[in-house]
Image (cartoon, rainbow, N blue to C red):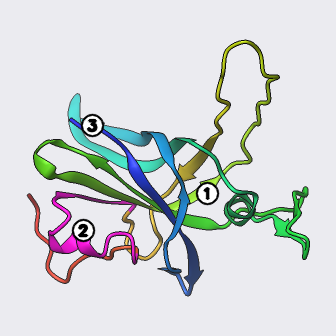
Amino acid sequence: MTLGLKDLYYAVCTEAEGAETYGAPKKMAEAMEADLSVKTETADLYADDALSESVKEFTNGTLKLGIKDLTPETLAEVLGQLVDENKVVWAGGDDEPPFLAIGFRAAKTGGRYRYIWLLKCKFEVPGEKYKTKGEKIEFQTPEITATFYKRKKDAKWKADFVGTEKDTPATTWFTAVPEPAPKMAAV
């Protein structure tokens, strides 16, 4: 159970020799909603007239973000667009969005948070809505959608931690994209 959403960050992901690395995280926008959906692929093998093996693997997922606003400069960076010396953003047919890591946290009860990083995402150009002002105030807020994938270097696609702001992982969660600790175990 979560009670809120805040601290939406992104970090540019680069790949060299099959290993992803990340730039310093930057604040993306004020978050209003994050909707994650995961796609898996299942394969069943039958032998001797019965199910012999069944494999289910992560393939990719979709992240839909509802945000208060995106600055043109941030939008340009996450979509691979250009900004000229006058700070005018230019979108073109050859724009190639970079891979990004996306991090945020959601409040839980008892002073805890769920901290999440999606480790390799690529955003789509969002639609835009504009509406004239009428008798009632209606906010127009953007939505932006990304597809997320597993990394090449270790097939990880998400880092997920629940704890307080004083717990060790939380103290650096938004200063660097986390990497797995040297020792890992099955739960």
Q: Residue furthest front?
A: 135
Sequence-wise first label, 1 or 3? 3
The residue at which mark 3 appears reads as: 3
Q: Is residue 54 visible?
A: yes
Q: Nearer the viewer, mark 2 or mark 1?
A: 2
Residue in the foreground of this view, choosing between 49 and 138: 138
Q: In the displayed structure, does residue 131 sit left or right of residue 16?
A: right
Does 169 appear in magenta? yes
The residue at which mark 1 appears reads as: 122
Q: Are the two marked residues, 2 and 1, in contact with CB atoms closer than 8 angstroms?
A: no
Q: Quadrant of residue 2?
A: top left
Q: Where's residue 111, x and y in %?
A: 14, 51
Q: Identify the element where label 3 is drawn.
A: loop
Q: Where's residue 77, x and y in %?
A: 70, 66
Distance, label 2 to label 3, CA atoms, is: 18 Å
Q: Are the two marked residues, 1 and 3, in contact with CB atoms closer than 8 angstroms?
A: no
Q: Circle 1: is it few (<14), some (14-19), or many (20+) Cα within 10 Å?
A: many
Sequence-wise first label, 2 or 3? 3
- What's the amino acid at mark 3? Leu
The residue at which mark 2 appears reads as: 170
Q: Identify the element where label 1 is drawn.
A: strand
Q: Circle 3: is it few (<14), some (14-19), or many (20+) Cα within 10 Å?
A: few
Answer above or below: position of 42 versus 70: above
| Residue that appears at 52% across and 64% down | 27
Magenta residues span 157-176
- What's the amino acid at mark 1? Lys
Sequence-wise first label, 2 or 1? 1
Quadrant of the drawing holding the N terminus: top left
Distance, label 2 to label 1, CA atoms, is: 25 Å
Q: Identify the element where label 2 is drawn.
A: helix
- What's the amino acid at mark 2? Ala
Q: Where's residue 75, x and y in %?
A: 71, 57
